[in-house]
Amino acid sequence: MIPIWYYAGQKLTTELKSKQVPLLALSAAFSFVIMMFNVPVPGGSSGHAIGGGIIAIVIGSWAAIIAISVTLVLQAMIFGDGGITAIATNCFNMGVVVPFVAYYAYRFISGNSKITSSTRVIAAAIAGWISLTMAALCAGFELGIQPILEHTADGVPLYMPYTWSVTVPAMVLEHAFAFSILEALITAIIFAYIQRTDTSVFYREKSEAEINRTEIMNGVTI
Amino acid sequence: MLRNLSIGLILLIIFAPLGLLAAGTAYGEWAPDELKDRIGFVPHGLEKLSDLWHAPMQDYNILNAPSFKSAGYILSAVIGVILSGSFLYFIGKKATKH
């Protein structure tokens, strides 16, 4: 994770606009709180949304890595949630996989639709769902590989006792049918709100003033 | 817009104790004794690592009294929001300086 954090930091200095700074701060705070909303699922387990999809759509995936990672490190170190030794893995799944999958899914589904169109809201919802489900798939693989890699000479697992056949379905199903649906709703609701308020807030979307300026520069008369 | 988003965040903080209703531990995040209940033993490596770090506000239970669990959870959310928000604000300010 360290090279990814470093590169994300570099990207932040070149890409971030000063008007996005409060949104960056708000993103981390939002992600912290939304992860506290544990949702129960049948079978006695629980889980939560991340908010990473909407964060990536608003401030970009590289900035999202920083925001979500800071949140996860705080949770682990101060509140004992997630685990110290799992910080890098958690940051990868939730801080890297979620924003990148979400952002590109959103762009792909949006296509050439107008930023104000309802297609975009649906794209945001699907991006939220896919991104968290993909992160769960990654986590399932990482958990399931543990007993294969880490065991004593006579095969007793040192950490995680369950392998892929258990961990992957457990992680993917509970996310696909519960937590990812919550993630989709959150992504769509916040997206729709910003879409109706100020679309220039979205990552790589220009404000009308900026569009007019470029058109004037290109010699277009309005 | 920032104002309304912040109001939304404050509402989320107030309703955060809803998250306490889910009693189960997240998949794969079991404590050593929970794992013992599931498989009958505590894996050796996990047992060794579990003493590596003791979080100052374990499980968002900072008031340390069962009757104040919700208040402690809200207070944890406030602390988390202030710490993560101000840290990112500082990073953001530094990144946009040039």
Image (cartoon, coloured by chain):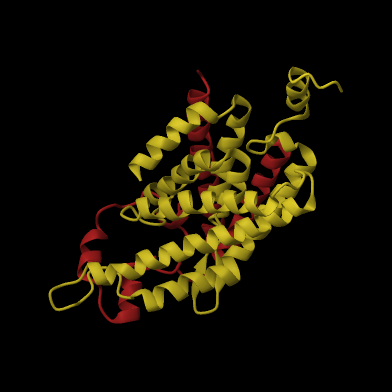
Which residue is outermost to the left?
Answer: A153
Number of numbered callouts drawn: 0
Quadrant in which the N terminus of chain B is drawn: top right
B7 vs A123: above or below: above
Most foreground residue, A15 or A72: A15
Chain in yellow on the image: A
Residue B61 is left or right of residue A212, and the answer is left
Residue B62: x, y in percent?
Answer: 45, 52
Quarter of the figure with residue B10: top right
Question: What's the residue at 46%, 75% (across, down)?
Answer: A169
At a point 40% along the width and 57% down the height, the residue shown is A82
Q: Residue furthest front?
A: A219
Q: Is residue B21 visible?
A: no
Residue at point 67%, 39% (across, down)? A202
Residue A216, relative to residue A107: is it above or below?
Answer: above
In depth, the one of A30 and A93 nearer the eye is A93
Residue A211 sits in which quadrant?
Answer: top right
Residue A217 is at least partly visible in this image: yes
Q: Position of residue A72 (x, y in %)?
A: 44, 49
User: Is residue B2 shown left or right of residue A171?
Assistant: right
* Chain letter of the red region: B
A201 up-or-down from A166: above or below: above
x then y, percent, for residue A187? 66, 53
